[in-house]
Image (cartoon, rainbow, N blue to C red):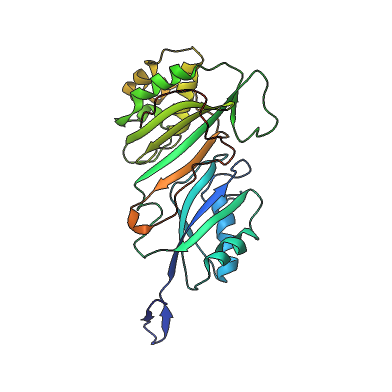
Amino acid sequence: MKLENATDSGATQFAPFRYAAAVEYAGADYNGWQSQREEQVRTVQAEVEAALSRIANHPVNVICAGRTDAGVNASYQIIHFDTRVERPERAWVLGSNSHLPDDIAILWARPVSDDFHARFSALERRYRYLIYSAPVKPAILSRGVSWTYKTLDVQRMARAAQYLLGEHDFTSYRAVACQAHSPVREVRGLEVYRAGDLIVIDISANAFLHHMVRNIAGVLMTIGAGEAAPEWARTVLEARDRRQGGITAPPWGLYFVDVRYPTQFELPASTLGPYFLSSQRTDAVQRLC
């Protein structure tokens, strides 16, 4: 139990407990992660806060590692929240899940120190973009993967991806409305490979800009379709002009899959989802990260 703090009135209040948790969700039916209290739209954050508040028996606000857009999924979104009550980890998980819709689940929850912050303590974030390339659109997982009728050359896409590794100005790969103060980000890993019938773009960076992964996916898919040379990825990067970057890929195939924190916080490791993605790679693309 944490120490009590004296108030101006002489009463005492217990300092809040801080918990971290991992959340999985399918984003198709939500207007993104972030609550929009001035609008009557469904968001993942609002659903999670409502469920946790019922277990805590008081309003709970959560902070996430990375806000996702409408339609974007997560297999390992990390949050933290403060509460006046102490509950068993099992209660936070099973109790909250009983109040959550079927497309959102809390995977684990555990107490953390006061200096843990889901966003600011993060060292690295990782996304996977899943592409189903086939003549006919999929009926199953129609909003869980990005479909294209075009045949994509994975090797061309992998060669193009190499130009985006490292620290760069990613103005050409961010949304025009992006509010980040700086367009500079460090891409630490970027590979393209096949996993069963899916093409996977697997990317990690210190942080991401608005629509950055979807814009990278759009460029790589154009290159994979043979509509541009692999070097076009570098040309777009060096232009520092979003208008040179082509289409923004759909949100359905994008998954937030991992966050790396300092080891001192001892958080469980991600299983690098989504769970239906086979770990068996069917080509020998060299790992670039």
Q: Is residue 288 above or below residue 263?
A: above
Q: Measuring 41% from the left and 32% from the top, which residue is drawn there?
A: 174
Asked whether residue 111 appears in the rendered view, the answer is: yes
What x and y, as percent, mark residue 25?
58, 47
Q: Is residue 189 above or below residue 5?
A: above
What x and y, as percent, mark residue 40?
62, 51
Q: Measuring 69% from the left and 33% from the top, which residue is drawn there?
A: 140
Q: Measuring 44% from the left and 70% from the top, which residue is drawn there?
A: 17
Q: Is residue 233 above or below residue 8?
A: above
Q: Is residue 18 above or below residue 44?
A: below
Occupied quadrant, residue 238: top left
Quadrant showing the C terminus: top left
Total tally of numbered discs in the picture: 0
Asked whether residue 183 appears in the rendered view, the answer is: no
Q: Measuring 59% from the left and 55% from the top, which residue is drawn there?
A: 47
Q: Residue furthest right?
A: 139
What x and y, as percent, mark residue 230?
40, 16
Q: Nearer the viewer, residue 26 or 244?
A: 26
